């Protein structure tokens, strides 16, 4: 390659387009993606530093005008250089432009006004706070007590956390300030949201199994051979304690750690555990941080002010100078795969980052992804298993109820006879329960009972859903219209919503169990940023008997008081037409079943289903991961789905159906002309499962092949075609081993 593309300013709001520079003879072979170089810039040829982001053989303008790279900066490799190397890896592996890949990995500085931050500060010592908390509790001032207890643990808490995660109202804070218990402090700079007294007491003593894992991983380190590890352990089996011990060891050696947690599990309790152990060495990221705040967090990491970054997918790109370990908790979660270009998987990128840094990767899950478990079986990852729950409590008793039998017996309600009995029993005893509807998406569609006509969104290829009976909404584009009373196809007045959403179930509960207090948690009731925590803390405070909700309620929350979990229709997630639906169902049912019986009281789980014999249902009921894995893998192997093979989804969108179809056909033709040692399996081009969205048509072509690199070649070829053909309005995206159907 004769030329290098160099970007000269990576802290700018918009990562600049690269400039081309000639690579002088003496530097050939020494420059790679990420290299920091000095280049002459502008009219005066002032020397400035830049980063190499790519290479090319020709440029489309006067070659004599191109300047030479002056030199390579040979200092130690900076975090930026490493990240640019990663961007280049991501671009190659998943397909996107270099600019988009760079924007994904580099913290982009945005000029933001310094926000005024408020904190709540305790004015009393711990004993007085405890006393005040006890008084508040006696007066049933729950929110006040909650804040006081929290202040015992940390004398200063960010105001937004108090209002948000702790769910204390502004009035309560004000009245406590008047009472002289607390003070509101305003500060300008960004700091950690919580400041904790580091808990100096000894951490828990690890069990033998836990110690073994820690020992083995640290041993590989000492031998200079850190690898990838999978810890398979049910919730409560002590994985987090293992993570903390591993992190502590890396910190001792002057290294840093990244811990990825799905955003939904980043709760106050989880966060506090890390602050208590590691004090202000910890930094937390979440999607609600502004660009500026995110940048600040990364800056602190770069300067060495923090050594542990906890957060969702994007925390992976923390610019630590000496990264020792990346831990991914709940590694099976779909949120680790990016839904926008580049559609990278955090698990794979973590391995690339760690191997470049000479660090380890630890994956943890109660229900490992098929991908990871397969690698563990092949010996690519090392597998550890934690079997016992350390918090006590017995595993719940799981019953499968066949809904077909209920129908035969004349029971048309959403609740089977057994579930109804148990709900009544718990209400009588004053114990809490959860009802889970594993339906992705929203309340049901609206159709005509006479002719079957479905009322659809005019801009998308989906049906509209009913909201409070008086309007219809599209959940993809936000389109709204008044409810339809008369069928547009046949004129009958039998138009009605299909009742299966959580809202309808809530109504049914009110009818059947009028005395029950219900909290509902779904996409509709968690629109505002703190709704989620508010509902959870209300339930934890026993302000309701029943928590009803979608999959949000089964992820990572402990309610020791819950003694009944009802899974209303286990089949709903099986009917998604997607090769991962059995796996997703198994994970959800296993997690749901694990929710009951966490405390001292024994728990009971009811799984209602029309397919009681389905292997995802039976194995989840038995909490039998191994056998589920075996059966599921056979299915993937038989149909050549990941992880038995690799799969590429080529996703095309555009405003004109005919133009889009032609483009899809042409691309497929180009691939047919390529040489392959073994030909890929091609499916499509076809209409995507969502055929139109916001007036854009959608098409998809799938390729399957044993060899990932062959799919990368297909992607490269298509990118080239698009570059040459320059379609006007049509867009192409690539999704390798997709998590969702397009
Ligand atoms: P997981 O991450 O697998 O859900 P945790 O590490 O959170 O499990 O452990 C569950 C609970 O058990 C926590 O309250 C933790 O403090 C406690 N625990 C974990 N390991 C031990 C141990 N060796 N001894 C005593 N308690 C432990
Ligand atoms: Zn729409
Ligand atoms: Zn009709």
Image (cartoon, rainbow, N blue to C red):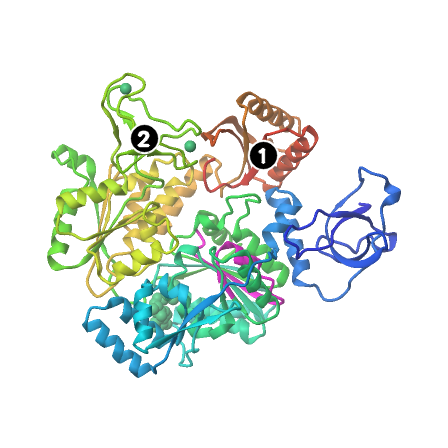
Crowdedness near tag 2: few (<14), some (14–19) or many (≥20) residues, C-alpha within 10 Å: few
Q: For residue 596, what is the image quadrant?
A: bottom left
Under circle 2, the secondary element is strand
How many callouts does the rendering have?
2
Q: Position of residue 226 (x, y in %)?
A: 57, 64
Q: Which residue does the image show at 65% across and 35% down from the upper left?
A: 719
Q: Is residue 531 above or below residue 273?
A: above
Is residue 565 left or right of 332 when viewed as pictured? left
Q: Position of residue 589 (x, y in %)?
A: 31, 48
Q: Which residue is mark 2?
A: 482
Is residue 249 left or right of 67 when viewed as pictured? left
Q: Which residues are magenta?
A: 309-332
Under circle 1, the secondary element is strand
Q: Which mark is residue 732?
A: 1
The reply to whether residue 210 is in sight is no
Residue sitting farthest toward the front: 178
Cα–Cα span, label 1 and label 2: 35 Å
Q: Is residue 676 above or below residue 306?
A: above
Q: Which residue does the image show at 57% across and 38% down from the upper left?
A: 734
Q: Which residue does the image show at 28% across and 16% down from the upper left?
A: 490
Which residue is nearer to you in this view: 335 or 633? 335
Q: Position of residue 732 (x, y in %)?
A: 58, 34
Is residue 479 left or right of 712 when viewed as pictured? left
| Mark 1 Cβ inside 8 Å of ligand 2 | no
Magenta-span inclusion, residue 315: yes
Magenta-span inclusion, residue 500: no
């Amino acid at each position: 390659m004769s030329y290098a593309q160099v970007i000269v300013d990576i802290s700018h709001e918009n990562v600049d387009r690269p400039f081309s520079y000639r690579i002088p003879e003496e530097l050939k072979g020494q420059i790679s993606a990420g290299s920091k170089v000095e280049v002459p810039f502008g009219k005066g040829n002032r020397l400035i530093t830049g980063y190499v982001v790519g290479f090319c053989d020709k440029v489309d303008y006067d070659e004599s005008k191109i300047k030479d790279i002056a030199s390579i900066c040979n200092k130690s490799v900076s975090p930026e250089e490493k990240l640019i190397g990663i961007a280049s890896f991501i671009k190659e592996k998943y397909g996107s432009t270099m600019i988009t890949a760079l924007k994904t990995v580099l913290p982009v500085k945005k000029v933001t006004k310094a926000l005024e931050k408020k904190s709540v500060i305790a004015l009393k010592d711990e004993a007085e706070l405890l006393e005040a908390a006890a008084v508040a509790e006696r007066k049933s001032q729950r929110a006040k007590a909650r804040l006081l207890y929290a202040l015992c643990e940390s004398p200063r808490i960010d105001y937004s956390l108090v209002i948000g995660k702790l769910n204390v109202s502004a009035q309560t804070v004000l009245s406590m300030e008047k009472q002289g218990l607390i003070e509101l402090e305003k500060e300008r700079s960004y700091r950690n949201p919580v400041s904790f007294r580091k808990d100096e007491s000894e951490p828990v003593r690890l069990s033998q199994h836990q110690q073994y894992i820690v020992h083995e991983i640290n041993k590989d380190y000492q031998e200079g051979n850190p690898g990838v590890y999978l810890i398979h352990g049910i919730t409560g089996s002590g994985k987090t304690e293992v993570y903390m011990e591993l992190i502590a060891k890396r910190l001792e050696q002057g290294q840093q750690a990244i811990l990825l947690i799905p955003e939904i599990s980043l709760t106050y309790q989880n966060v506090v555990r890390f602050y208590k152990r590691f004090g202000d060495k910890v930094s937390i990221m979440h999607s609600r941080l502004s660009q500026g705040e995110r940048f600040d967090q990364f800056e602190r990491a770069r300067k060495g002010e923090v050594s542990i970054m906890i957060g969702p997918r994007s925390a992976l790109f923390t610019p630590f100078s000496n990264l020792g370990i990346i831990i991914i908790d709940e590694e099976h979660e779909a949120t680790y795969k990016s839904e926008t270009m580049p559609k990278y998987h955090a698990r794979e990128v973590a391995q690339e980052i760690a191997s470049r840094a000479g660090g380890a990767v630890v994956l943890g899950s109660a229900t490992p992804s098929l991908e990871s478990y397969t690698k563990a079986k092949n010996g690519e990852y090392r597998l550890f298993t934690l079997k016992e729950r350390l918090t006590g409590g017995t595993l719940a008793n799981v019953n499968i109820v066949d809904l077909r039998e209920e129908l035969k017996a004349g029971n048309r309600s959403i609740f089977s006879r057994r579930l109804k009995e148990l709900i009544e029993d718990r209400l009588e005893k004053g114990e809490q329960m959860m009802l889970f509807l594993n339906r992705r998406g929203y309340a049901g569609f609206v159709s005509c009972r006479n002719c079957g006509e479905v009322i659809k969104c005019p801009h998308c290829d989906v049906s509209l859903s009913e909201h409070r009976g008086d309007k219809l909404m599209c959940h993809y584009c936000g389109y709204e219209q008044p409810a339809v009373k008369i069928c547009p196809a046949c004129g009958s007045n039998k138009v009605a919503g299909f009742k299966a959403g959580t809202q309808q179930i809530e109504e049914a509960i009110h009818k059947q169990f009028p005395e029950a207090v219900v909290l509902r948690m779904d996409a509709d009731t968690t629109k505002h940023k703190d709704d989620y925590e508010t509902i959870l803390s209300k339930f934890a405070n026993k302000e309701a008997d029943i928590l009803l909700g979608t999959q949000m309620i089964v992820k990572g929350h402990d309610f020791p008081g819950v003694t009944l979990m009802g899974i209303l229709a286990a089949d709903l997630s099986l009917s998604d037409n997607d090769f991962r639906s059995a796996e997703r169902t198994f994970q959800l049912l296993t997690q749901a079943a694990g929710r009951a019986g966490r405390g001292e009281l024994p728990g009971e789980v009811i799984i209602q289903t029309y397919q009681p014999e389905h292997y995802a249902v039976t194995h989840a009921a038995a909490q039998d991961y191994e056998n589920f894995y075996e059966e599921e893998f056979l299915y993937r192997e038989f149909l050549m789905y990941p992880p038995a093979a690799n799969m590429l989804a080529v996703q095309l969108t555009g405003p004109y159906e005919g133009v889009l179809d032609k483009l899809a056909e042409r691309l497929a033709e180009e691939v047919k002309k390529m040489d392959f040692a073994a030909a890929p399996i091609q499916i499509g081009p076809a209409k995507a499962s969502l055929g139109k969205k916001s007036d854009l048509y959608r098409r998809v072509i799938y390729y399957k092949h044993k060899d990932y690199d062959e799919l990368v070649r297909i992607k490269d070829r298509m990118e080239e075609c698009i570059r040459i053909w320059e379609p006007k309005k049509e867009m192409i995206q690539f999704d390798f081993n997709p998590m969702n159907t397009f």
